[in-house]
Amino acid sequence: MINPESLANLHAQCFSTPRPWSSKEFQELLLQTSVHLVSNNYGFIVGMLMGSEAELLTLAVDPQRQREGIATELLQEFESLCRSNTVKKIILEVVETNIPARKLYETNSFIVQGARKDYYSGANGIKVSAIVMVKVL
Ligand SMILES: CC(C)(COP(=O)(O)OP(=O)(O)OC[C@H]1O[C@@H](n2cnc3c(N)ncnc32)[C@H](O)[C@@H]1OP(=O)(O)O)[C@@H](O)C(=O)NCCC(=O)NCCS
């Protein structure tokens, strides 16, 4: 899963809030040298490495292959990439109501650092808060 079209296809299957990203958006994002893709046949992570910090920008797993440990594997691979680039802290934002993702991150030792009220706009214009989670490596 390495071309922007495949990434956008899977993203569209996985997200409504935040809205799915287009293949053009993936293409432009991945041109940035700080942006890294970790992927396998069923899922991917896009993250940005900025010195001692990294931001996990998005994570998606094929809906047909969820609960098989794929996100956990991808997170481990992303963490290895971070460690080998001397990143000390990974940060991410997750939709407050996204219980599967919040459980995944908790299980993988991310802790809640705070919240960003009304951070996302849902499909119907309703605002949804983000939870900020952090993992110190
Ligand atoms: C969140 C997501 C990435 C999880 O991917 P996954 O490959 O199914 O996750 P894993 O199989 O590695 O799950 C690891 C642990 O996370 C938790 N978890 C994952 N999905 C869960 C669910 N639907 N309900 C409750 N807990 C869940 C569990 O603790 C799970 O361990 P267990 O299966 O032994 O109970 C996937 O559901 C997804 O792509 N969702 C849509 C996109 C999204 O929300 N991305 C994250 C945005 S920040």
Image (cartoon, rainbow, N blue to C red):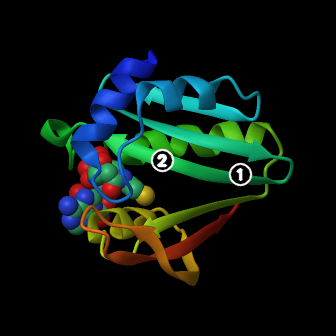
Residue 97: image location, x then y, percent: 30, 75
Q: Amino acid at mark 2?
A: Thr
Ligand 1's image quarter is bottom left
Left or right position of 37 against 97: right
Q: Identify the disc placed on residue 54.
A: 1
- On whether ligand 1 comes within 8 Å of the CB at mark 1, the answer is no
Q: Amino acid at mark 1?
A: Ala
Point 64% across, 40% down: residue: 80
Q: Are marks 2 and 1 in contact (CB under 8 Å)?
A: no
Quadrant placement of the N terminus: top left
Q: Is residue 131 above or below residue 20?
A: below
- On whether ligand 1 comes within 8 Å of the CB at mark 2, the answer is yes
Q: Circle 2 sits in a helix, a strand or a loop, which is it?
A: strand
Going by the picture, which residue comes out furthest to the front? 125
Q: Residues within 10 Å of mark 2 (few under 14, many from 20)?
A: some
Q: Identify the disc placed on residue 58.
A: 2
Q: CA distance from mark 2 to mark 1?
A: 12 Å
Residue 124: image location, x then y, percent: 24, 67
- Toward which corner of the image does residue 88 lie, by quadrant? bottom right
Residue 118: image location, x then y, percent: 46, 80
Q: Nearer the viewer, mark 2 or mark 1?
A: 2
Most foreground residue, 46 or 107: 46
Left or right position of 70 against 115: left
